[in-house]
Image (cartoon, rainbow, N blue to C red):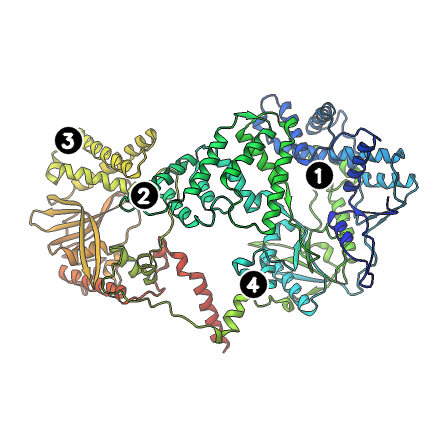
Amino acid sequence: MSDELILCATARLAQTLRQAPPSATVQVWRTPRALTPAQWLAGLADEARLTGIADLPPALDPFAEQLLWEQVIATSFDGAAALFDIRGMAASAAEAHALCQVWQLAPGGTMAAEECRRFAQWRQAFVQRCRQAHWRDVAGLHLAVIGLIEAGAFVLPTHVMLLGFDRPSPLEKRLAAALSTQGVATEFRTFFQVDRSSPLPAAVHACADVDAECAAAVAWVAQRLAADRDCRLAIVAPDLAAVRERLAYRLDDVLHPTLIRPDGAELPRCFNFSFGQPLAEQPLVRTALEALALGGGAKLEQARLSSLLLATGWSTDVSEADARARLDLALRRELPYFTSLPALIRLGQRHAEWAATGVAGAKADDCPVTLAALQALHETLSAAPRRQPPSGWVGVFRAALQGLGWPGERPLSSREFQARQAFAETLDAFAALDGLLGPVVQADAIRRLSQLTAQRIFQPETRGQPSVQILGVLEIAGLEFDGLWVMGMNDDQWPPAPRPNPLLPAELLRAAGAAHASADVELAFARAVQQRLRQNAPEQHFSYALADGSRLRRPSPLLADLPEASTARFDAPPTLTHVLANTLEGALHAIDDAQAPPVAAGERVAGGSWLLRAQAICPAWAFYQYRLGAEAMDAPVEGLDPAARGTLVHAALEAFWRTIGSSAALAALDDADQTAAIDTAIAAALSAFETERRSPLPVRFRQLEAARLQRLVARWLAVEAARALPFDVLACEAPAEVEIEGIRVRMVVDRIDRLADGRQVIIDYKTGASIDTRNWAEARITEPQLPIYAALVSEAVAAVVFAKVLLDKPAFAGVAEEKDILPGVQGLDEEKRKLFPVDRFPDWAAVVAHWREALHRVAGEVRDGEAGVRFADEGRLKYCDVLPLLRLPERRRLLAQTLMHGVET
């Protein structure tokens, strides 16, 4: 054995001591024997088993111990376990059991609360289960090994230093005492080698919020590294998990701006986080777990299948990526909200057959290897026994993932390779749970594997010692730096709030001074840590946030004796974006994206009246969507989305009027006949809808939708029956085509009625509550379909209206040549008008002329390639499919910078 052993409070400190050379002048040295107490005691336990010193049972890992506590607690509730948070109770029980052993607590007594009595029963059952199965919890194993040390069972080092323990527990003190009784020189030290503290006081910085704190800390790091690339710095946070993502983003942005390149994601950083992330959050592992969860074929949300289909890390994730994206588009359009993996496979096979046989409209989006991989995954999981132990399921899962082609066809990065190894180790750990779980069904096996993977913290190995370490307040114990920034020093975080275990008497925890037992314990701990931080670095900064949203925050009282300092000298350094935009003007060229190529001769522009609508609202919208072909992805919804419901209303009214045909025939129907006619129309609409979707609606859902349509159509027909002038339905869903400024515009008019004098009433059904007709009197018509028909297709039009088919306040809305043509519709023969003022629109011909001129102007913009991002009302962009392409936030920021620059100059 080595003559000296260093027992470290954290694994980070032990690793640092093992890796760091003693000084720059030393050429050869012996690596210090630095371990945590848990690591050293585990090694002694192995030695005891191998040499026959003692038959120590193996220690349960944290997940196995959690499972055992869950089983013990669930059994105690006699079938009512589903009513309780068993996992939460098990976590509290495991913590309480460890506290009892580490802090030498003896709860009990007749005056104990119900929770404490329950815990005593659970603990007794837990210990009994461990004894029967020859298991041991970790703390219990440590106590057993310490007992062997006290008995003189081991050859021990001559000197042991316990380094970095701010709050030694009774177990750690007992270990030190046991070593001392065996003649080992033992000492506790809070820091190593030399005291790095400085006579200069630490600086305290007040920041606007947590984001500003992160920015100031990173700016300080950048300044220090710019002055000395070899300096060692640390950022410390009491709640590192809460700020990890924000710090990582800013550190990348400031220290490694070139990582914006896709091929730079795996380049080494000059900083390192001590706090890892759950293994389940690694993309490669997340893909594997999700594939196993979806592969069984159960119905689930469409979005989960879509996410798996687009994920990398399985099968031909590179060579068939485009085909997968097209299959995802078909999935969103053709499959219901709740669907299954077999349904997706059939969809892909059907599209492949259509493409192979030349079905009209079918694209060659075949991805055969992807579909074969999904089929192999499904078949492997479906063929597995219904119940088997974890070790059996691990074999099935490995075979299923192999059939899926996991982890994909591209070479793995270092991080991905380590994640794959960690997942393989996790599968092995899951296979070792046979004795605890016994035979389980597939869903439970996947759930438990996911829990185990989420519990395992993944921290990829880094090369060397990065200059910047981001640590928690416990992990910095004993480490040395040239500079230190401690953030999160607010009174609600520092000292930490006490959190006594709910299953142990609070007075017992306070009397023992157990960790987190009381405010006094946490205050003493925080003071000790803050004093120790003074020994970690000669330069120190503490920061706190002034607000969190609308909530005001205060500094920790432990900062009261430290001087306040400004953060102005820690302004964020310029990022790559800033440099490119402001310092490389000569290398950059501004491009005016407001002008697109004009429409070429013979070029067909899609969109119909929607093209002119988009152009009138925002020219860039029309260009991106209808000339470049960009469109939003369909968002899956449960049941029918508003567009589908509107389609059914249109179809039902079309079927009804094709049968009835006129106002006279409508008036001749009695209530029973009208109800029957509506039912027939609704049945036809639903059948056509199901045929187009290629899947029937659920029976009960179909009945509910039919009842909704019955009420809605009947309510609307009451409005139709109140029309004063008789009419015949000339056409339903009538196609029309017109050329405007060289742009072919195709459209479909919902309904055309013919009055007795031969004039026409043009009707467009609307099932939404928001209808705008005011734009018809404006220079840019944003609802152009009816004006197009009235001004450019038909000459004998008496009215153009929207039919508001609603249960609440159904009505016509629009404009007519005379009043009383339609109930509630303004006539141009009225003196008082809300929509078309008399001075600008004296008669119907003036309205039609205005429409013709406005439509030709907007169509001319399309023809000439006008594609600027300009609009009068941002609210009209609510349903813009290409809104992200307009880049409104970036344009606002550039405008603000321009205005600010103008003010400064």
The crowd level at tag 3 (other Cα within 10 Å; few <14, some 14-19, many 20+) is few
Q: Nearer the viewer, residue 220 or 848?
A: 220
Q: Which residue is mark 2?
A: 356
Residue lying farthest to the top in this orientation: 78
Q: Quadrant of the N terminus?
A: top right
Secondary structure beneath disc 1? loop
Amino acid type shown at disc 1 = Pro
Residue type indicated by callout 2: Ala
Residue at which label 1 appears: 500
Horizontal arrangement in the rendering, residue 316 relative to residue 816 (left or right) = right
| Mark 3 or mark 4, earlier in chain | 4
Judge whether residue 340 can be spotted in this image. no
- Whether residues under marks 1 and 2 lie with C-beta atoms below 8 angstroms apart, the answer is no
- 4 or 1: tag closer to the N-terminus: 4
Mark 1 or mark 2, which has the lower sequence index?
A: 2
Q: Residue at x 61, y 53 (%)?
A: 243
What's the CA distance linking mark 4 and mark 1? 47 Å
Q: Answer few, some or many: residues within 10 Å of disc 4's Cα (few below 14, many 20 plus, some between 14 and 19).
A: some
